[in-house]
Amino acid sequence: MPGTRKPGMDHDHYDWSPITARPPLKWPRGARVALCVIVNLEHHEWTIPPDGFMPAAALGPQRLPHPPSTPWSYHQYGHRVGIFNVMEVLDRYGIKATVAMDAATADNYPFIVQECQKRKWEFIGHGLTMQRIITSKMNEEQEREYIRTSMNSLQKSTGVRPVGWLGGEFSESTRTPELLAEEGVRYVCDWPNDEQPYKMKGQDAYFLPTLLELDDEYSMRAPRFLPVTEYCQMLQDAFDVVYHDSAQSGRVLAFTLHPYLMGQPFRVKYLDLALAHMTKYGALWKATGKEIIDWYARKR
């Protein structure tokens, strides 16, 4: 039977709300746009585990008759070189990233964890590995344990329990937002449907929307393969429009980066160019996800 339908919605995670009918949103110190850069640090396994899953379109180890050394080592570039290139650019503009880190990275890359901590980056949950993402094949207890394991790994490695979550490949089941909230997550970044935060129904938790098409992987990998120059222009154009639209009510520009991709030497200078363009605007708040949600929760 078809699900229950009501205006704008097919589920009960949150209420539908047109942005033009909301009270004006004010950011700290008169800022018009809250800029949130999310850096994804993800471990790719050699093979897909028997209980694992990854989308067919995702670049990474598949069930091949030989070791997938090339795609595996391509992703490893992000942990060995790319992340430090991205850090250098973000440092230049005084941007504290929100780092979505999976359990395998948290457990096995203490040097990277320490470098993030030096910069006061915020850590948020990102699952176990890219070959083990949330699917509707999990029962409720399996999904709870998955979330718990991811959160526990980050807490053990960083000393702080994360309050944010971004699913690997934006993966969720129909119950994921509520399970995350029940495990202490205060905000979820998997729903790219707005330019302001909004509340999860029935929970002390929120959604922090990202602009999906500004995800570097979404734009520059299969099937789109946009050139990095076009991606750089997209970042600048998006910021210009969001800034213009924020004249009466504050907006969020949140987007996700993958160091194995954007940290490549022929791409990272375009991240620099895009951020130079954004940060020349005076009424800009460079914030982590937690800072945005804490402010929004107090003011709403």
Image: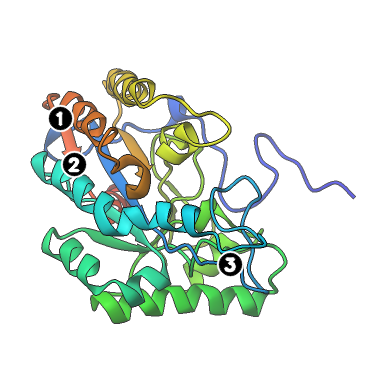
Crowd tier of the residue under label 2, counting other residues whose Cα lies within 10 Å: few below 14, some 14–19, many 20 or above: many
Seen from this angle, which residue lies furthest front? 66
Tell me the residue at 62%/45% (across/down). Answer: 57
In the rendered structure, which amino acid carries the disc numbered 1?
Answer: Thr
Dot 1 or dot 3: first in sequence order is 3
Which residue is labeled 1 in the image? 279
**Residue ID for mark 3:** 47
Query: From mark 1 to mark 2, how far is it between C-alphas?
Result: 9 Å
Which element is circle 2 on?
strand
The answer to whether 221 is drawn above or below residue 150 in the figure is above
Q: Earlier in the sequence, mark 2 or mark 3?
A: 3
For the image, the number of numbered tags is: 3
- Residue 133, position as x, y percentages in the image: 57, 63
In the image, residue 51 lies at what x, y percent? 66, 74
Is there a contact, CB below 8 Å, between mark 1 and mark 2? yes
Q: Earlier in the sequence, mark 1 or mark 2?
A: 1
**Where's residue 178, x and y in %?**
56, 64
Discs 2/3, front: 3
Residue marked by disc 2: 286
Color encoding of the figure: rainbow
Q: CA distance from mark 2 to mark 3?
A: 38 Å
- Residue 242 sits above or below residue 213 on the image: above
Q: Report helix, strand or loop for mark 3.
A: loop
Residue displayed at 54% across by 48% down: 59
- How crowded pointer 1 is (Cα within 10 Å; few <14, some 14-19, many 20+) is rated as some
Q: Mark 1 to mark 3: distance in Å?
A: 41 Å
Using the rendered view, name the quadrant where residue 277 is placed: top left
Camera-nearest residue between 223 and 1: 223
Residue type at mark 3 is Thr
Of 284 and 126, nearer the camera is: 126
Q: In the image, residue 94 lies at what x, y percent?
A: 10, 44
The label nearer to you, 1 versus 3, is 3
